Image (cartoon, grey):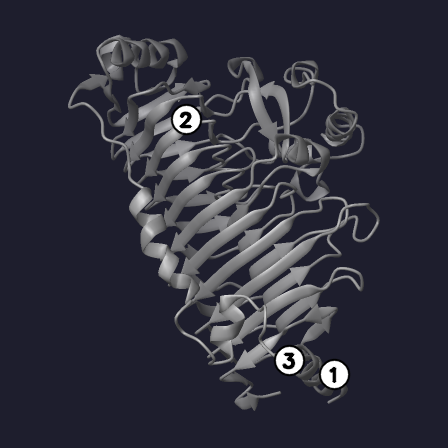
Amino acid sequence: MTGRRTFLKALAVGAVAGAGRPAAWLQAQGRSTNNDPWRQLPEILARIKPPAFAARDFDVTAFGAAGDNATDNTDAFRRAIAACVRDGGGRVVVPPGAFVTGAIELKSGVNLHVSEGATLRFSRDVERYPIVFTRWEGVELMNFSPLVYAFEQRDIAVTGRGTLDGGADCAHWWPWKGRTDCSWKAGDVRQDADRARLFELAEKGAPVQDRVFGPGHYLRPQFVQPYRCTNVLIEGVRLVNSPMWQIHPVLCTNVTVKDLRLEAAGPNTDGCNPESSRDVLISNCFFDTGDDCIAIKAGRNADGRRVKVPSENIVIQRCHMKNGHGGITIGSEASAGVHHVFAEDCRLDSPALDIAVRIKNNAVRGNVVEHVYARNLEIGQVAQAVLAIDFYYEEAEHGGFTPIVRDVMLERVAAKQAQYAVHLRGFANAPIRDVSVVDCTFDHVARPAVVEHVEGLSLRGVRVNGQPWQR
């Protein structure tokens, strides 16, 4: 009962007069409904429009591609995309079959359409992935091309009902993480030295063109990465066996990610990580991942502050999260900030899903995360917490940049099993502010809530293990 009394005391301290409070806090107190934050959603969705493409098809087999699961089709795909661009855009169509390829680079006006029954089987030969300008764990560098890549393009897409197979497993790509449970053993190559070197170069302000990795180094490529692109659509396809992060829009505007199946059990195989991007819709996707299902990013440490572009206006609807570390996650690489995130009507359920809604931060990242709203989530079982906000992630307080999280609302959420309903840990000099939990039910909760350095925590209509949770 001690933990419960401490939690209720924290609520009473935080629930003071509403002057200056965000709209979400006021609404949770029943004091105003005129400023419902969800009223912003229609305007955001109206801006997110999938690109349109010319009614022209370019079958890759007409350019020499063979779906025999053996021929290297990298050049054939390049020729088909070039022809599509030359003729004014359209669909580059992959018919049924198994097409082996290296990196594919999309160009403006091109929809790469992977037909039902088709598989793009990406090569495990690192030489098939040229060095390009990319971002790795929130830091810009020159590295292996993502498997599907676009740089500063408009009106691009990957669509269809086919499969993209990244070819990663415990013998290819994944061992670079250095995990002993995925075939790595002492003396094998691993990413640690390269990762540390990249972060060191970024902290020193080295120009991006001098941060060269690629062959001879061990930083795994992402699966699909549009970089500085406008009007992006990724729809319908199934992604399996990704080397690392799966869908990774960076510095993009107007992105639609819908109707995907994202399946990879390897290390850092996050499902969809919009980074420093705005006006992004993620809908009707299924996630079964080896890391976060969705993780909203905005650059890491000094490099994130240098680029200085937040992620904003991110909408998540009707998704199903199975395995992963976090279901709907913000951070930790979010040093340029994240604001206006809306998640609704999602289902999250697995004993191998750690946390349903997660915000991770620390004093090395330093950023503002604000205006985060989740409603109508159906949560079966999670291993740890339904809502977690943690300033003690990795480096914790050992840094000079203040983490700020404020105006977070969890509304109409039903959870059937968790260790904690909420697990909130701010700093004494940087408390988490204005978290509202409204009309939620948490059943089979094993432990009292953790509430450390939180100001303005508010509950209304909350039940835990069948009992009202009141101030």
CA gap between label 1 and label 3 equals: 17 Å
Image height check: is 114 above or below 396?
above
CA gap between label 2 and label 1 equals: 55 Å
Q: What residue does disc 1 label? A: 6
Residue 433 spot, x, y in % from top left: 65, 65
Mark nearer the viewer, 1 or 3 = 3
Q: Left or right: 216 with respect to 409?
A: right
Q: What residue does disc 2 label? A: 121
The residue located at (81%, 45%) in the rendering is 400
Say which element carries label 2. strand
Residue 32 spot, x, y in % from top left: 44, 76
The residue located at (29%, 21%) in the rendering is 109
Q: Where, quadrant-wise, is the N terminus in this rendering?
A: bottom right
Image height check: is 353 above or below 25?
above
Mark nearer the viewer, 3 or 2 = 3
Q: What residue does disc 3 label? A: 16
Q: Earlier in the sequence, mark 2 or mark 1?
A: 1
